[in-house]
Image: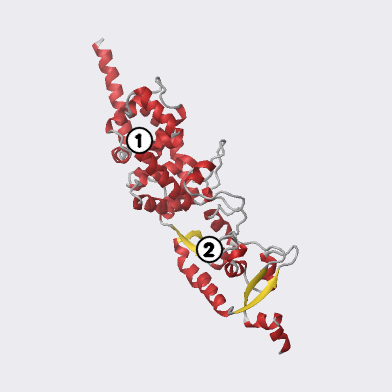
Amino acid sequence: MRTIIFIFLTIISIQANSVVDRYPSYKYVFGEFDIDDEYIYDGEFQSFLKKNHKRYERYYKKSLDRGGHLIPTFKSMLMRDDLSDLFVYMAMVESGFKRNSVSSASAVGIWQFMEATAKQYKLTVNSDFDERLDPILATSAAMNYMHKLYKDFGKWYLVIMAYNCGEGRLQKAIDRAGTDDISILMDSSSAYIPRETRNYLKKILQVAMIGENVSLGLEEMGDAVEQLYGKDVVQVEIDPGENLEKIAKMIKMKPKDLLKLNHHFKDGVVPVKLPSYKINIPNMKIIDFYAIYTLSKELQRQKKSFYLSHVVKSKETLHTIAKKYQTTVGEVAIANPSAKGRAKRGDVLVIPVTQKVFSKFSNWGNSK
């Protein structure tokens, strides 16, 4: 009998050590999420890790292919906001970095916000654009939400649980269990929290350990990972009514690549209702943007120092009016803030134009 027990304990010890050896980054990951190191020896967690290693290794690689260039930006944002940069793996698990991801429950974007929660955290969702699809704005909203959850629960692994199953459900689970200990809350036989939430936390921990193994040089993922981590994303301000495809060509980008970074604009055009708006571009394109787009806009504005009045006719839009006077929708919108981005029949609009256009349309110009 003693021999059998000894063999059994030896097998368990070998299995535990194999998991620890496979994930040498576990102490760092656990520490960032307020998890005791001993949780690595939890039987259910170890079974999950062994069963899913290959699966989530593939998942990690595919996620990098889709959005690895966003990771440096996300990590920088998280750290500036006093959050662990490992929360980037929560976004990875939420959506696989699919920017236009929509769940069966209608949660949208990289951070999978429901519409009500998105609006609660100052994201705009309307017929023109959906800021849940903006990776930068959605990340800011997610960070605010996580800070709120941490204030409520006081531990980062509880923040992850609450993000998935909701604050109310988690609080009920803690009350039932009489503790917020991770081993007790994650116990499948007690089912204090939903199975989906238990697996959600385990998946984040496993993907984080795989990712940190790569970051620490403990695991190879190929040159693609290094190339992706070398990219970054910044925000730049553009005028309303601008077409992203046009801007992409100006800064020597493939239009589809710029649109991927700005999925929240539903038709690829910045709404004219706003005086200005920020879009996401790769950091490597920042010089092109300021040298080409910003400079051309400044020159354009300098030249348009003449003004005409225009009475809006039936079926006219800001686009048709701007085209008629060889100007842009953005400049017309800025010159007419009370119009709120719309052209209503009978309204009198001020149109900024060049001297050439002014001469063509004005009585003064026609008399010359």
Q: Which of 214 and 81 is in front in this view?
A: 81
Quarter the N terminus occupies: top left
Residue occupying image coordinates x 27% and y 20%: 9
Rendered position, 160 above or below 240: above
Rendering coords of residue 362 (x, y %): 70, 81
**321 left or right, relative to 11:** right
Q: Quadrant of residue 243?
A: bottom right
Q: Please, what secondary structure does the residue beneath circle 2 have?
A: loop
Mark 2 nearby-residue class (10 Å; few <14, some 14–19, many ≥20): some
Rendering coords of residue 365 (x, y %): 69, 85
Q: Mark 1 points at which residue?
A: 153
Residue occupying image coordinates x 58% and y 65%: 337
Residues at marks 1 and 2, CA–CA distance in whole angstroms: 38 Å
Rendered position, 144 above or below 49: below
Q: What residue type is labelled 1?
A: Phe
Residue 52 seen from this side = no
Residue occupying image coordinates x 38% and y 22%: 176
Residue 305 seen from this side = yes
Residue occupying image coordinates x 44% and y 61%: 283
Q: Mark 2 points at which residue?
A: 276
Count the labels in the image. 2
Q: Please, what secondary structure does the residue beneath circle 1 have?
A: helix
Q: Quadrant of residue 31?
A: top left
Along the polypeptide, which appears first: circle 1 or circle 2? Answer: 1
Q: Which residue lies furthest to the bottom in this view?
A: 368
Quarter the C terminus occupies: bottom right
Rendered position, 174 above or below 139: above
Q: Nearer the viewer, residue 158 or 23?
A: 158
